[in-house]
Amino acid sequence: MRVVLAEDLFLLRDGLVRMLEAYDFEILAAVESGPELTRALAELTPDIAVVDVRLPPSHTDEGLQCALAARQARPGLPVLVLSQHVEQLYARELLADGNGGVGYLLKDRVFDADQFIDAVRRVAAGGTAMDPQVISQLLSRRARDRPIGGLTPREREVMELMAQGRSNAAIAAQLVITERSVAKHTSNIFGKLGLPVSDDDNRRVLAVLAYLDRDS
């Protein structure tokens, strides 16, 4: 699996390269700035771009904007964004284009190799990997604005795990319930939120997140 990596901190970039290579990823390019990332994504054909939100020269959201531009040029390009903090605006921008795999992880997750590599693989395969803290903040903000469709506490737990990109089987294992129970909770969630039911994990994740983040 081929990766373009963008991270301006040398030690973290070098560590990510070593980690990914240890899991048999091929690093096509490991760059440190927005212009370098733009060139790499234009000239190479990675299976996934792993991108720090803040890159030189602006140190604002240059990495994210480069990745979004690349997705316009190559629809469906999987992008996993890394950020130091939960920044809901960036999550919203990334999720606005529901075409192809997307992920948003806090950099703390990078130090858990299994979790990070699982996220890279999931996004590269067209899935979604959202940091639990991002989901928790979106849920908390939505709950402050208005009740989330009258969801029960268990339905909120299921929705949070669903929005992280978990399958029904993974949710069942996490909550120690049956897959049939998860399916029932999922159906109730979609009904209460007025969302179309979908068996596609990525589409249902994006649908839930779009609902939670609208009207904000």
Image (cartoon, rainbow, N blue to C red):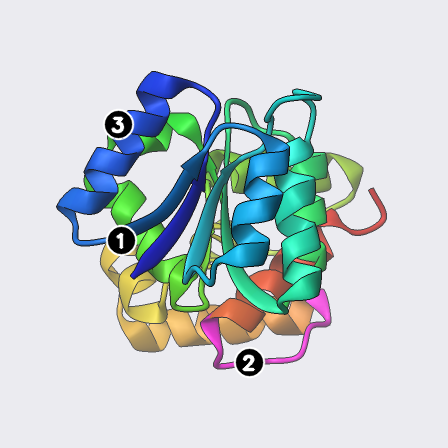
**Lower sequence index among marks 1 and 2:** 1
Q: What's the amino acid at mark 1?
A: Glu
Q: Residues within 10 Å of mark 2 (few under 14, many from 20)?
A: some
Q: Reply yes or no: does residue 19 show up in magenta.
A: no
Q: Position of residue 176 (x, y in %)?
A: 23, 57
Please say if the residues under marks 1 and 3 sit with CB atoms less than 8 Å apart.
no
**Pointer 1: residues within 10 angstroms few (<14), some, or many (20+)?**
some
Q: CA distance from mark 1 to mark 2?
A: 33 Å
Can you tell which quarter of the image residue 38 is in?
A: top right
Say which label, 1 or 3, has the lower sequence index.
3
**How many other residues sit within 10 Å of disc 3, few (<14), some (14-19) or many (≥20)?**
few
Residue ID at (46%, 40%): 131
**Comparing labels 1 and 3, the label whose residue is closer to the camera:** 1
* Three-letter amino acid code at the position of disc 2: Ser
Q: Quadrant of the C terminus?
A: top right
Left or right placement of residue 84 versus residue 192 in this view: left
Work out whether residue 132 or residue 68 is closer to the camera in this orientation and state it: 68
State which region is magenta.
193-201
Give the residue number, with chain letter if any, for mark 2.
198
Query: What x and y, as percent, mark residue 50?
Result: 45, 44
